[in-house]
Image (tube, grey):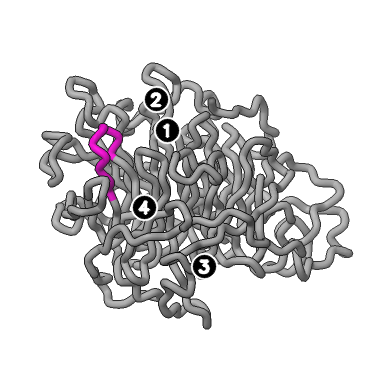
């Protein structure tokens, strides 16, 4: 089930800043969300699962000198239980369901595909990957195919969008075709299917993902979703958030096995803007600042974690054609760009004469509680019954893990966020106390915590500082 929106206002086609009649009297909010996030009653255990090898940034240590830049842990949905993990420095690893055997599946640094993480190691490199739902189905067009999202020098190819505006790198989606889907070392061919110019070093391509719960023959089966940030620079200086001319600040929805002419991919016929020649037809949703991660629930809902600028972190539900408000909205608040003469940085109350229809978050928190929302999944496993049906997500910097109920969610009516309690060796502790490392962005150390999921719906914690994968299990 994909939620759809019937109509959007014509003004969405323009680059604009919404101007309010209350511009002269608006005051910034000192504490946008006064309610504090309390610890809930759910306690889970955290156990060691896997240690990844140490890797190095190509240009030496970045702003965060990580042991290994682990980003995602996802299953190969072929019945084998295999798990694949990416290090953004260019490596895809594969391991068995027990985490006992780890090996390199594919090293992009050894492939002639223009891979580079040299621009900004903290946000460029091998950003994401996804296996086609027919990866293990011999005879099907998707057999052996998987996809990677990564950064590439701007002189290595011609971009579908913003080729002339690219700085020193571009974001790429590449298709790989394995000769044998059952092998744990890649052998096969590849082709580039999408490229977009990046004017700055951050807020690049992020998650790429197929809906793992779509049934064969359904409209969403074999369709690839791709998240793109606003291109970087504080406060969206290129105003990509409210532009529909390119897929920046959006989640794209494409058919990687379709296409013709210059495009190496197809546009699904049910995309919301497919019939409008003035709009990039790849766009599924837009107005996102930096949705580095999104995930699907079993009913097809898409949960999107959008990293805020200065004040508010968001969890959103994907609604086809929806405008999520950036850069004139941050959470359920207005930014300075919604007013005349307001100071960028803080957030403000929504204007009373709001002229634009936005899709607001289902959950939000401010920077007294965390710094940057990370990955999350709706828990559908069996090991921890108390978590069943809850969306579990992390603040990547502080290492806090939160959850919300998902039964009755409504955009614009933020759900109650509670903090998950963690046991290490039977003792309740904070994740940040277990794993953290120095950051040159701020005076506090950071956990750099991400989450993963296996084919049984069980959840994992990935930390860049120590290169470890841990698993959530029942508390003792």
**What residue sits 39% from the left and 32% below the top?**
212
**What kind of secondary structure does the magenta stretch mostly adopt?**
loop
C-alpha distance separating marks 3 and 4? 26 Å
Residue 145 visible to an observer of this rendering: yes
Q: Is residue 418 left or right of residue 454?
A: right
Q: Quadrant of residue 75?
A: top left
In terms of secondary structure, where does tag 4 sit? strand
C-alpha distance separating marks 1 and 4? 16 Å
In terms of secondary structure, where does tag 2 sit? loop
Q: Which residue is mark 1?
A: 211
**What residue sits 73% from the left and 69% below the top?**
343
Q: Earlier in the sequence, mark 3 or mark 4?
A: 4
User: As displayed, is residue 80 above or below residue 185?
Assistant: above
User: As displayed, is residue 173 above or below residue 340?
Assistant: above
C-alpha distance separating marks 2 and 1? 7 Å
Q: Quadrant of residue 307?
A: bottom right
Q: Which residues are magenta?
A: 76-84
Crowding at label 3, few (<14), some or many (≥20) Cα neighbours within 10 Å? Answer: some
Residue 79 marker: none
In terms of secondary structure, where does tag 3 sit? strand
Q: Which residue is mark 3?
A: 428
**What residue sits 16% from the left and 54% below the top?**
103
In terms of secondary structure, where does tag 1 sit? loop
Residue 72 marker: 4
Q: Earlier in the sequence, mark 2 or mark 3?
A: 2
Do the residues under discs 2 and 1 have CB atoms within 8 angstroms? Answer: yes
In this view of the protein, which residue sits in the foreground, 177 or 83?
Answer: 83
Q: Which residue is mark 2?
A: 221
Q: Is residue 18 left or right of residue 221?
A: right
Single out the mark in the foreground, 2 or 3.
Answer: 3
C-alpha distance separating marks 1 and 3? 35 Å
**What residue sits 78% from the left and 53% below the top?**
19
């Amino acid at each position: 089930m994909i939620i759809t929106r019937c109509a959007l206002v014509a003004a969405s086609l323009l680059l604009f800043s919404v101007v309010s009649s209350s511009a002269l009297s608006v005051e910034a909010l000192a504490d946008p969300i006064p309610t504090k996030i309390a610890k809930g009653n759910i306690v889970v255990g955290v156990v060691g699962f896997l240690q990844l090898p140490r890797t190095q940034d190509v240009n030496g240590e970045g702003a965060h000198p990580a042991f290994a830049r682990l980003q995602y842990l996802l299953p190969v949905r072929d019945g084998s239980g295999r798990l694949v993990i990416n290090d953004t420095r260019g490596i895809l690893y594969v391991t068995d369901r027990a985490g006992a055997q780890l090996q390199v599946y594919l090293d992009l640094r050894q492939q002639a595909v223009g891979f580079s993480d040299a621009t900004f190691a903290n946000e460029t490199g091998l950003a994401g990957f996804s296996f086609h739902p027919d990866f293990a189905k011999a005879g099907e067009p998707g057999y052996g195919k998987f996809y990677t999202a990564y950064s590439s020098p701007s002189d290595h190819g011609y971009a579908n969008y913003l080729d002339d505006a690219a700085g020193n790198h571009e974001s790429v989606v590449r298709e790989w075709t394995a000769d044998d889907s059952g092998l744990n070392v890649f052998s096969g061919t590849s082709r580039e299917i999408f490229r977009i110019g990046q004017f700055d070093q951050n807020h690049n391509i992020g998650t790429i993902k197929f809906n793992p719960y779509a049934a064969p023959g359904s409209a969403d089966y074999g369709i690839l979703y791709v998240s793109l940030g606003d291109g970087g620079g504080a406060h969206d200086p290129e105003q990509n958030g409210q532009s529909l001319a390119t897929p920046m600040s959006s989640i794209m929805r494409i058919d990687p096995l379709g296409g013709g002419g210059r495009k190496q991919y197809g546009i699904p016929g049910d995309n919301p803007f497919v019939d409008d020649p003035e709009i990039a037809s790849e766009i599924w949703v837009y107005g996102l600042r930096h949705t580095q991660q999104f995930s699907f629930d079993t009913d097809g809902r898409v949960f999107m974690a959008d990293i805020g600028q200065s004040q508010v972190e968001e969890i959103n539900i994907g609604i086809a054609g929806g405008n999520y408000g950036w850069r004139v909205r941050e959470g359920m608040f207005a930014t300075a760009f919604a007013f005349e003469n307001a100071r960028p940085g803080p957030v403000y109350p929504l204007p009373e004469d709001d002229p634009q229809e936005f899709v607001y978050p289902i959950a939000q928190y401010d920077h007294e509680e965390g710094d940057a929302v990370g990955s999350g999944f709706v828990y559908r496993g069996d090991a921890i019954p108390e978590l069943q049906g809850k969306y579990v997500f992390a603040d990547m910097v502080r290492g806090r893990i939160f959850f919300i109920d998902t039964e009755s969610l409504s955009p614009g009516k933020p759900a109650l966020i509670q903090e998950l309690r963690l046991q290490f060796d039977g003792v309740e502790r904070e994740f940040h106390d277990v794993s953290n490392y120095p950051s040159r962005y701020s005076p506090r150390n950071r956990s750099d915590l991400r989450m993963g999921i296996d084919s049984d719906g069980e959840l994992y914690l990935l930390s860049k500082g120590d290169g470890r994968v841990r698993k959530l299990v029942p508390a003792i």
